Amino acid sequence: MLRYRPRGRRFAPRKDAPGQEASRKIAGIEPADHLQEHLDRIRTELGNSPDIIFRQLKLGGASEANCAIVYLNGLSDPEMINHDVMESLLQLSKEFLQKERSPADFLDMVMKDGLAMGESRMSADWNEAMLAILSGDTVILIEGADHIIIAGTQGGQWRSVTEPTSQLVVRGPKDSFVESIATNISLIRRRLKSSQLWLETMKIGSVTHTHVAIMYVKGKADPGIVREIKDRLNRIEIEGILESAYIEEFIQDKTITPFPTIYNTERPDDATSKLLEGRIVVLVDGTPFVLVLPTVFAHFFQSPEDYAQRFDIAIVMRLVRYISFIILILGPSVYIALTTFHYEMVPTQLLISLVAQREGVPFPAFIEAMLMEVVFEILREAGVRMPRAIGQTVSVVGALILGQAVVEAGLITPAMVIVVALTGIASFTLPAYNLSIAGRLIRFGFMVLSGMFGFYGLTLGVIVLIAHMNSLRSFGVPFMSPISPFRLRNQKDAIIRLPFQPLQTQAAESSTGFGASSNQDTSLAGDSDGRMSGSGQQGADGGSASGRGQHTAANGAGGNRNS
Amino acid sequence: MRKHQGLTILIMCCCLGLLSGCWDVVELNKRAIVSGIGVDWKEEEKEYLVSFQTVIADEISGKAGRGATPTSVYKASGKSVVEAMRNASRKVPRIISLAHTGLIVISDRVAREGIIDLFDYLDRDSDIRLNAEVLIATQGQTAEDVVSAMTPIGKITAFALEQKIDLTSGQLGENFRIEVDDVIRGLLTPGGGPLVNGVMIEGSAEKASKMETLKNAKVEGLAVISQMAVFKGDRLVSWLNADESRGTVWIRNKMKITPIHLKLLDQGGEISLEVMRSKTRLLADLEDPANPIIHIHVEPNFSIREVNSAIDLRNPATMKLLEDAASREVIRIMELAVRKSKKVNSDILGFGQAVERSDPSAWRKMKNRWDQLFPRVQVKYHVKPVIRNSQMRDRSVLYKIHNQ
């Protein structure tokens, strides 16, 4: 079990975050003489909870030095507490303890020589102590001391690393993030062994105190965007974070849009490749989905599979995804427009067949399409939420009974069933689920437009949609880059995926060395500083950030996997 | 009110969209798809009689077919096509939709009266396509007969006729596709007129329109493509015969494949060649502006298809002989076409265009006199025939019999 320890608090300490209103009055730990008082206080503050374990003991067995350890059963690792905490405390040198010592000496001694643990720290902050207990750490209190010791004994049960369930590949790594942030960080670190991979953590949620970590590759990630992300994270005021989507909603650029402007993934390889592109990964404790930002539209069409297959095949696969997205959005509406407004555009033979199908169908094409699409959404929703055992029944009922019966009863034309089925299948080709649901929503808008105005409305709708997509920004980076604003240099991994050779050249051009030793770090830092001052400091500033965003948008994703 | 202004405006905008309704929505089952239009002349009322060949989709691909004819013809009369179409609404339960009309048949009678008003309608109408095929029904037959005819292969006569034209222009070379826009271009030709394919009912027109005819292996009535009709201005003046049609097609550079029959005087016997491909260029010589000379350069490639003679095809001299004979035959065919067009004084061969190309300024001057100049135009033929192959054999079996 990998243990997670924040590497230094680089964030400005939050004024009010870790702690309830009530406890702010007693911010420090007074040098109470009575250990029992402290313990009572902990007990009352936590509501006399039976899963808090209080264990009083004497240091080294000596009678003078009373001490106590407090931990939360279930969240901590009992093995560690028994072996590394209790045992070491009890085996402290008796000679030392027998002399007259001040509580501070005891504290010092335990810290320096009495704890066989890598992760422990002293604290004088009551709130920190409480939080430590609630996160599974063990708090050691010593009679008369004005500090407590927090020993990192977090443990407990987590789901183990399994295959991803939402982003599948035929060929590629089969591990997926889990709910434990420590495990997730280790999954990335294992892939990206570089001193340049920086990690910063913070706690968000006034009640849940959820660990949130930011990871980025120093020297590749735009420092302005890193700062902007930290700013936005610090501004979050919420009681609880249970999923990274909560964070996503708070930190995304404020626009009304169905499109996701932050990419999420449950694949460590995907997250790593994005890190290599200079993007920033936000991990949230308790969810296997990590956020990647800044995001561009093309990300939602890239699958890790693209880099595991030959590039020519990957190009075709990716094109299929783009075409599917267009079918998903426009399929039913084009059908409505063609059959109700622009019958002249349908090839004659097809038209005759469509006319024959429509004979005796009671609903107008628009109503027909709406009905079928809604039915399809119902089926899909049922299929997703159903217990897995019943899921198959849903698909059988949906596909066979509904699809066939509806046609045979003459309620819906077979062509409409084909169109709806096609859009349904098309929506499944997208590797990113959140873009596909966005497409499904937009599709209904287009159906209304084409039902009212035909291709005229459809064309206007597409223009508005494209304008809207171009107006989107993800942390200052234009959402549609590098397609618009168009950069030929960055097309290597956007719509198509070129072989690794050019991808790699581009990576080499656009960033300095990577995986460098420590003496190169300074030069890298200097370089990035220079860039910062040179091209505008505000990460959210569209103009300046966009350039860099695109710069990194296309490179790296595959190229660095080579190395 | 003030407080909810934004919301009110939003709701009103949404309502605005709904108020416009569904614009000009027409569901497919409210349309009668017209595949072909026939235009006849009613002598007594001095009106057009327009026949719409409408597709009965059920009979073609639906499950609900009643075994009836795949097309149905609705007739209506009026001073103009539009009037006739509106009159037809008494008979047709659905909107007459002309966008898929593939064929427009005009009777010989109408064509002789003038087609300019008809083509203004066809050109102006937003539904009818400019690439609809135009046919003239042979003298004595009506356009209605043509659009009413059944077709054994394919279900819709109009589309079958379209295919027949494409096929015969590629296989026989006595026709080429003439669409609405071609006719309009023809109408605009100074001193000329359009050239339109003909169509006729072979057999009984009465029986052709009955479903029963399809139950016979020997079809009793069939719409077939006939020779081309020549217009002067917007009036039909004459019909071409087979060779004249072929010559016209050749001069207009539309020749693809056509058979040529040669009689061999020296060796005896006959030989059939086939044009594999051919290229024609018209050049005008305007040295004497009063007497323009048109040079017709033809480069046909032949293939020997049938040899009913004992000649030795291995001999280059024989080949030369054959090429000369073929070249004379080509010239003969083209001369027939030129003679005919001069006779009816209609520049259907594109000579005016050739003059315009070689000297636009001179053409501007003589454009108005082209009517007078055209019959006096001298034509020079330059044929460069090449016999490319003799298919799988060189000599005929006859050669061996003779030389045994």
Image (spheres, coloured by chain):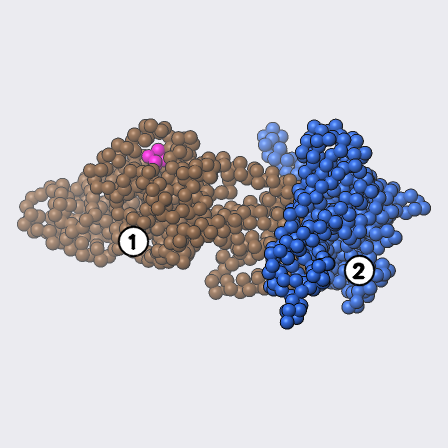
| Image chain in blue | B
Label 2 sits on what residue type? Answer: Leu
The x and y percentages for residue B172 are 71, 55
Nearer to me, B293 or A441: B293
Q: Is residue B39 magenta?
A: no
- Residue B132 spot, x, y in % from top left: 73, 47
Chain letter, disc 2 residue? B
Q: Position of residue B400 (x, y in %)?
A: 63, 69
Compare residues B13 and B217 and report the one nearer the observer. B217
Residue at 32% x, 30% y: name it.
Answer: A532
In the figure, B188 relative to B230: above or below? above
Residue pointed to by mark 1? A75
10 Å neighbourhood of mark 1: few (<14), some, or many (≥20)?
A: some
**Quadrant of image for the N terminus of chain A:** bottom left
Front one among A304 and B185:
B185
| Numbered mark located on residue B222 in the image | 2
The magenta segment is A222-227
> Quick check: A288 left or right of B144?
left
Q: For residue A266, say whether it is visible.
A: no
Q: CA distance from mark 2 to mark 1?
A: 91 Å
